[in-house]
Structure formats: C-alpha cells, structure tokens
Amino acid sequence: MNSFNFLLLLACVTLLSLGQLLFKLASDSFPSVISPGSLLSFAVNKYLLSALVIYGFATFLWVWALSKMPLSLAYPFMALAFIIVPILSYFALDEPLSISSLIGGCIIVAGLAIAVN
C-alpha cells in the first residue's frame, strides 16, 4: 500500500470517528418526548448537522479509497475507530479511558498490521 492510500484511509477513519464524537454531542439535546416539533428542532442541531456533513465527506473519501484498492485491504483500517473514538472521547468529553481500552487498542493495531501484510 502506498502512502497516499494509507493517508486516505486514515483520513476516512478519523473523520468517521470525529462524526461519532459529534453524534454524542448532539445526543445531549435529543428530545425526551418525541413529537414532530421536537424532532424538527433536533434535526437542525449544529452537532448533528456537522456530523452528517462529515459522514458525507468521509463516505466520499471511502469510495475514492475503494476505487484504488481492494475492500479486503481497506476495510481492516476501520478498526482504528475503536482506538480513535475512545481517545477523542477522553479529551473532548472527559470520558474515562481505561487501561484495558489501551491494551485492546494495541491488539487492534497488531491485528491490522497482520491483516494488511
């Protein structure tokens, strides 16, 4: 895999992870009582809209990446989200980051290295 394809996949998984962070921020204003008005109000939430735009761009990057490499080579990189999301959550949302998550992340990186070689 060349460095451009690697960076393309890394950008894709990073954007998807950022989208998850924004979805979490949007969830804070999810209505407790569902009504057409409350759903409409939620639909224009800045975090939700930002996440959807980022997901759209990440999808474009993903399709571009798939045009350059086999799915079986590209898809294992999505596992990096299991590392990126907890780290983003720790810094941006003040969520706990456990040692078991860090160990699991190391195992994922090792598995990714094996899968793509």
Image: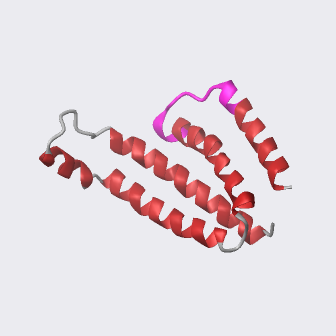
Q: Quadrant of residue 107?
A: top right
Q: Residue at x 18, y 38 (%)?
A: 34
**Residue 64 located left or right of residue 24:** right
Quadrant of the frame with the N terminus: bottom right
Q: In this rendered view, identify the residue nearer to me: 113 or 63.
A: 63
Q: Is residue 50 above or below residue 63?
A: above
Q: Is residue 87 above or below residue 75?
A: above
Q: Residue at x 55, y 27 (%)?
A: 96
**Residue 62 located left or right of residue 109:** left
Q: In this rendered view, identify the residue nearer to me: 90 or 113.
A: 113
Q: Is residue 1 above or below residue 103?
A: below
**Residue 32 located left or right of residue 55:** left
Q: Which residues are magenta?
A: 91-102
User: Where is residue 82 shown, x and y percent of the image?
Assistant: 62, 41
User: Where is residue 47 shown, x and y percent of the image?
Assistant: 35, 51
User: Where is residue 17 shown, x and y percent of the image?
Assistant: 54, 50
Q: Residue at x 40, y 58 (%)?
A: 52
Q: For residue 55: magenta?
A: no
Quadrant of the frame with the C terminus: bottom right
Q: In this rendered view, identify the residue nearer to me: 9 or 92.
A: 9
